Amino acid sequence: MTAEAVVTVRLVRSFEHRNFKPVVFHGVRLEQTVQDFMQLVKDDIATRPGFPPPFRKYSYDTMKIIHQAHGAKTNELVMSLDDDETLILQEGQTLRAAGVAHETEVAFFRKEDYSLYKANPQTAW
């Protein structure tokens, strides 16, 4: 198993409007903590050229595994609302301990938005 992985981070700005932007990170150290990785993503998108300001300045605070390589994908357009207790990454864990592996896709979002959407999962156009 390699120490570095490719991880796709789906920045979720709005669940209702299906407003998200995937960003691919190469060379991700799976031994770093979840909070270190969150900070790395925030720092990266703050300085990434051509990145839209609404995504750049958003207050993301939670990560959840959407998809593992060679696993089944969800039918949800933004992310699944199931299995929060196993799929939401806990801050004290390393990425590897949290279940992140090479070619994992994770959502990065604001927990408050997710809770509101989960209580009433309607999409708007």
Image (cartoon, grey):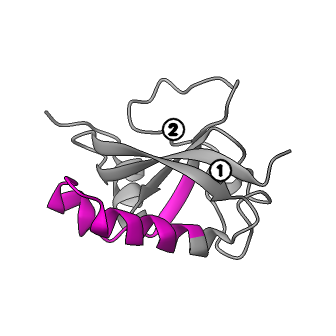
**Kind of element beneath mark 2:** loop
Dot 1 alpha-carbon crowd within 10 angstroms: few under 14, some 14 to 19, many 20 or more: some
Residue at position x 70%, y 69% in the image: 32
Residue at position x 32%, y 44% in the image: 21
> Is 82 included in the stretch rendered in magenta?
no
16 to 11, vertically: above or below? above
In depth, the one of 88 and 102 nearer the eye is: 102
Residue position marked by numbered label 2 in the rendering: 80
Residue 121, x across and y down, in percent = 35, 41
Of the 4 image quadrants, the one containing the N terminus is top right
Of the 4 image quadrants, the one containing the C terminus is top left
Q: Quadrant of residue 109?
A: bottom left
Residue 31, x across and y down, in percent = 76, 65
In depth, the one of 25 and 104 nearer the eye is: 25
Inspect the image, locate mark 2, and give the three-letter code of the amino acid beneath it: Ser
Marks 2 and 1, the one that precedes in the sequence: 2
2 to 125, vertically: above or below? below
> Is 59 included in the stretch rendered in magenta?
yes
In depth, the one of 121 and 59 nearer the eye is: 59
Inspect the image, locate mark 1, and give the three-letter code of the amino acid beneath it: Leu
In depth, the one of 74 and 123 nearer the eye is: 74
Residue at position x 72%, y 59% in the image: 30
Instruction: State yes or no: discs 2 and 1 in contact (Cβ < 8 Å).
Output: yes
Residue position marked by numbered label 1 in the rendering: 87
Residue 115, x across and y down, in percent = 42, 59
Dot 2 alpha-carbon crowd within 10 angstroms: few under 14, some 14 to 19, many 20 or more: some
Tell me if 1 is positioned left or right of 11 in this view: right
Please report the bounds of the magenta region as a residue range. Answer: 37-64
Q: Quadrant of residue 116?
A: bottom left
Q: How far apart are marks 2 and 1 (CA)?
A: 10 Å
